[in-house]
Amino acid sequence: MRLFRRLFATMLLAATVVGIVAIDRYQVTIGEGASSAIISLGGFPQVSGGTRISSSWFCPGAAAGDGISSASVVIVNPSDTEIIASVNYLSDALPESRTVKVEARSQVDVDILRGRTVGVVVPIVEIIGSVGTVEQELVYAAGDVTSQCVSQTSAQWFFADGFTADGSTERLVLTNPYPESAVVNVSFTTTEGRRTPPVLQGLILAPRSVRSIFLTDAGATNESRIAVEVSTLSGQIIASRIQHYLGAGRLGYSTTIGSPSPAKEWWFTSGRTGPGVTEELVIFNPSSQTAQINISFFGEGITNGIPIDEKSPSAMPSSTIDVEPGAVIAVKTDGIADLPKGDHAMVVTAIGGTPVVVEHVLSQQTGGKWFTAVTNGIPRGLLSEKWRVPSGLLNGARNALQVLNTTGLDGTFTVAGVGPGGLVGFPTLIDRPLGAASLVSIDVPEGISLGEVVITATVPVAVQRRVSRGHGLVGFSIVGALPVISRR
C-alpha cells in the first residue's frame, strides 16, 4: 500500500507539470449520404446549438420489476413557441407511442411504465425541431434517480464500473430502436480477467425491441468490479446499465447509458474526500495496448493541479499509472495524503495514444447511513461555454451545481432559469468571477421557481450537478448537465 501511494503521489506531481490545458473547440465529422447525420461524440449526452428539423432522445429505461414507484421522461421546451413530441415505448412487447404538446417555456412529465409491474420499458422521444431537451426521472424508495438521455445510437458501448457484490444487482439493457434486427456481442472484465460468455454472443435484437440481461446470470456473481463492452455485428443500439447497490460499502440505485467510445481525457466536477467517504476513479482499458494515465485535481487549496512537495521521500521516477490491455482498475483518492479534504474536480488523461473509459464512484456514510453515486465523465471534446440542466434545480439546494473552469484563463459565468417570461438570471449568479482552473460549487437561492437552468460562461467549463435522493434519504446522486455544442 505504501508503494502504491508513493507511485501515485509521484504520478500526480508529473500531472502538475502538464498544467491546465486550453480546450480545443469541438469538431464535427460529416460523412456521405446516410452517415451525414452522425456527429463526432454524438452518443454522449449533449444538445445541438444549431438548427435541425427534428431531434431524437434515447433514454436508459426503467425496470418495473425493481419496485419503482413511478418513472417518467421530462420533456422541456425553453423556446417561445409550442413544440410537438412523440414518445415511443419499447419493451419486450409490441412498441407503443403517444404524442404530447409542450407549451412555450414549460415542461411536461410523461409516464413511462403506465401501470406495468414487470419488465423494462425504454422511452424514445422524438421532437419536431431542435430546441427541446429530455431527461429521465425515477421515483424509488432506495433513492430517486435522474438520468441523462442521448441523441444518437452507436455500434459500441462501454461501462467501466459494475458491481454485484453482497447481493447487489447489475442489469444490462440493450435497445434496438430501428426497424431492422441488430446482432450484438457482450463481454465483461472482472479482477480475474476478460470473459466472453457464449450466452452473450450473437444476441439478436428484434426491430424496435428491448432485451434485459442480469450479469449474474452470465456468471458475474459477487464481483466488486465489472467492466462491460457491448459491440454490434450489425445495426446500432443503445446500451444502458441499471444498478441496485445493497452492500459491500455501496447503497442506492442507478440508471445510466454507457459511453459510446473510449477517450483520452475525462472531466469530473463533483469529487469529494473526507471522513466516511470512499471515492474511486474506475478506469477500463478495452484496447489491446497498455494505457498510461495521469490524474489532476482542482479545487480550494489545490494549486496548479495538486500540491505535492517535490522534496518528499515519496517522490519516485515513475509518473504514470499503467492500465494493462483489457484491464479495469480503481484508483482510490483517499490514499493521496496531500489531497485536501472536501470537494474537488478531476481530469483523467491518457498521455499516450491509448484512450480509456472512466467512471467516478462516490460512496459516503452520513449518520450511520450510506449512499453511492456513480457518474460518467465528460470527454474533452464536449467542454463548452454553455450548458443546460433540463429538469432544473431544487429551490434552496446546497452545493447543487459544480462549475469548473477548464482553462488557464480567468472568466465569468451566469446561471439563469427559464421562467414564464423567459430567461431570468439567478440573484448573485450573474457575471460571477471564475478564476483560472477554479471550481465553484453553487447553492440555489431560495424562492426560485423556474424550469430548465442555463449556465453560460466566457471560457470552456465542465458542469455537473448533485441531485437529492428524496424520501428523507441522506446523500445525493451526481448527474451531468448537457453541453450545448455548435456545429461548424
Image (cartoon, rainbow, N blue to C red):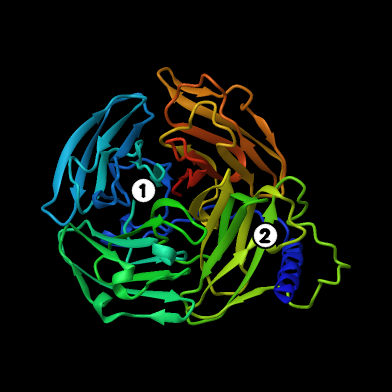
Q: How far apart are marks 1 and 2 (CA)?
A: 32 Å
Give amino acid for label 1.
Cys
x and y percentages locating residue 440 in the rendered image: 65, 39
User: In this orientation, does residue 43 appear?
Assistant: no
Residue located at (58% from left, 33% from top)? 398
Q: Name the residue under label 2.
A: 334
Front residue of this view, candidates 161 and 128: 161
Q: Residue furthest front?
A: 368
N-terminal label among 1 and 2: 1
Residue located at (58% from left, 45% from top)? 366
Q: Residue furthest left?
A: 94
Residue located at (37% from left, 73% from top)? 220
> Where residue 149 is drawn, which disc sits there?
1
Give amino acid for label 2.
Asp
x and y percentages locating residue 44 in the rendered image: 42, 54
Front residue of this view, candidates 93 and 481: 93
Q: Is residue 341 left or right of residue 353?
A: right
Q: Is mark 1 on a helix, strand or loop?
A: loop
Q: In this view, does 44 lie above or below 156?
A: above
